[in-house]
Amino acid sequence: MHREAFRHAFETVYGLPLSLDGVPAAGRTDTWLLLEALRRAGVEEQQARALMPRAFVAMQNYADAYLGDLRGNVLPGILEVLAGLHDAGQMLGLLTGNLSRIAMAKMRHAGLAAYFDTGGFGEESDVRAHLVPVALRHASERAGHTISPKHAVIIGDTPFDIEAGATHGTRTVGVATGPFDEDQLRAAGADLVLPSFAEVKRSVEALLGLAGV
């Protein structure tokens, strides 16, 4: 659905029969993906950015119309780990390259949206790493006091996530449920690497320990 939303925006906003085929998506933001596909097609960045607000609306409207039930796609342990962290008093934020409306629509359709209080999203930067201070600022506003990077933990399944957290001084956790294995996440410098969240108790304890709880 998400890839089709890009195709829809390319056709209806830019008038081009483009897709994300051949564009590496893991760990990227929707802003970067849109610009990269257009750059490869020879569109000047100024023109690409000028139409970007319309493209984002088109993508988000497409997602609202075509996104289906995602509860069957939730990996083992995710719901229970989120609940365990929430019950332990942790503020949870969704830091993602997805546009905010698409990201939260996915979470609603997966039955996970209620656990996320804040976040940083793909329309707020081209570069994923830049979303870390954005998310921390939003979290601080939500909490009513400044949350420093040293009190934050970034959890992700790509080296981009690990590098983003390390760049801004957070602790980092790599979970090998995506396109990268444990060794690759460890090599990226993750403070903690987990094979998955299937072992709920172990995962929650490890995450809380890293957070200093």
Image (tube, rainbow, N blue to C red):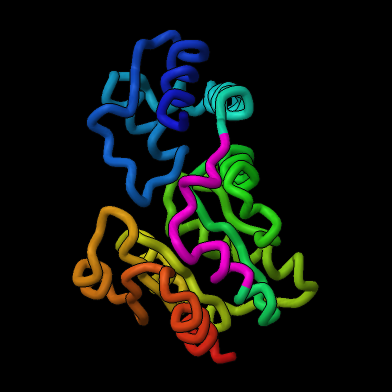
Dominant secondary structure of the magenta stretch? helix
Closer-to-camera residue (124/86) = 86
Which of the 4 image quarters holds residue 90? bottom right
The percent coordinates of residue 10 (x first, y second) are 44, 18
Confirm whether the magenta stretch covers residue 72: yes
Residue at the (56%, 32%) spot, across then down: 68
Residue at the (49%, 45%) spot, across then down: 72
Q: State the quadrant of the C terminus.
A: bottom right
Give the residues in magenta: 69-83
Establish if 83 lies above or below 110. below
The percent coordinates of residue 129 (x first, y second) are 43, 59
Which of the 4 image quarters holds residue 91? bottom right
How many numbered callouts? Answer: 0
Task: Kindly give the residue lying farthest to the top in the view shown.
Answer: 15
Task: Kindly give the residue lying farthest to the right in the view shown.
Answer: 144
Closer-to-camera residue (84/193) = 84
The percent coordinates of residue 71 (x first, y second) are 55, 46
The percent coordinates of residue 103 (x first, y second) are 57, 44
Residue at the (61%, 42%) spot, across then down: 109
Confirm whether the magenta stretch covers residue 145: no
Closer-to-camera residue (206/142) = 206
Which of the 4 image quarters holds residue 186? bottom left
**134 with respect to 182 (left or right):** right
Residue at the (23%, 64%) spot, across then down: 181
